[in-house]
Amino acid sequence: MIKVTIYQNGQGDISSFTVSGHANFARHGEDIVCAGVSAVTFGTVNAIEEIAGIIPQIAQGDQGGFLHCELPENISKESYEKAQILLKGMIVSLQTIERDYGQYMTITFK
């Protein structure tokens, strides 16, 4: 199962997220749940870099199935707001996947 954890600060803004595990929906290379979650999360990281101009702190697992993305603390208000919009868009996309394939992935907010 893929587990997505969204970390929020006291104001409800997203400070980081972690993705771990594998969906096991289908064989490796044919798993649409893994592919969808990967596309959404890596696309968000790329968008944060390109659109918000922020280089987040990234950690990835050697075997795949793990991604952690954390926003740096000292960024401009404008970049921060752009990143929040992108991260909230990511959540909407992930919730859509979870709605249809909830037995293969879960989202938790902390």
Image: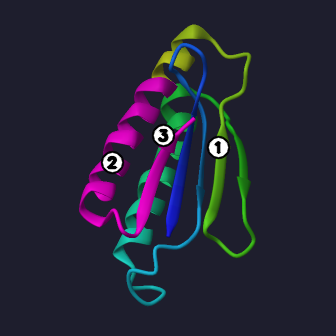
Q: Residue at x 43, y 90 (%)?
A: 27
Q: Secondary structure at mark 1?
A: strand
Q: Position of residue 32 (x, y in %)?
A: 35, 74
Task: Specify the amino acid type for callout 3.
Answer: Ala
- Mark 3 and mark 1 residues within 8 Å of each other at the beta carbon: no
Side of 106 relative to 7 (left or right)? left
Answer with mark 2 or mark 1, whichever residue precedes in sequence: 1
Q: Position of residue 106 (x, y in %)?
A: 44, 56
Q: CA distance from mark 2 to mark 3?
A: 19 Å
Seen from this angle, which residue lies furthest top? 77
**Quarter of the image with the C terminus in it:** top right
Q: Position of residue 104 (x, y in %)?
A: 40, 69
Residue hosting label 2: 95
Residue hosting label 3: 47
Q: Is residue 101 magenta?
A: yes
Q: Position of residue 23 (x, y in %)?
A: 46, 73
Residues in magenta, as a range: 83-110
- Above or below, 55 against 63 in this view is above
Task: Specify the amino acid type for callout 1.
Answer: Cys
Q: Is residue 22 magenta?
A: no
Q: Nearer the viewer, residue 81 or 55?
A: 81
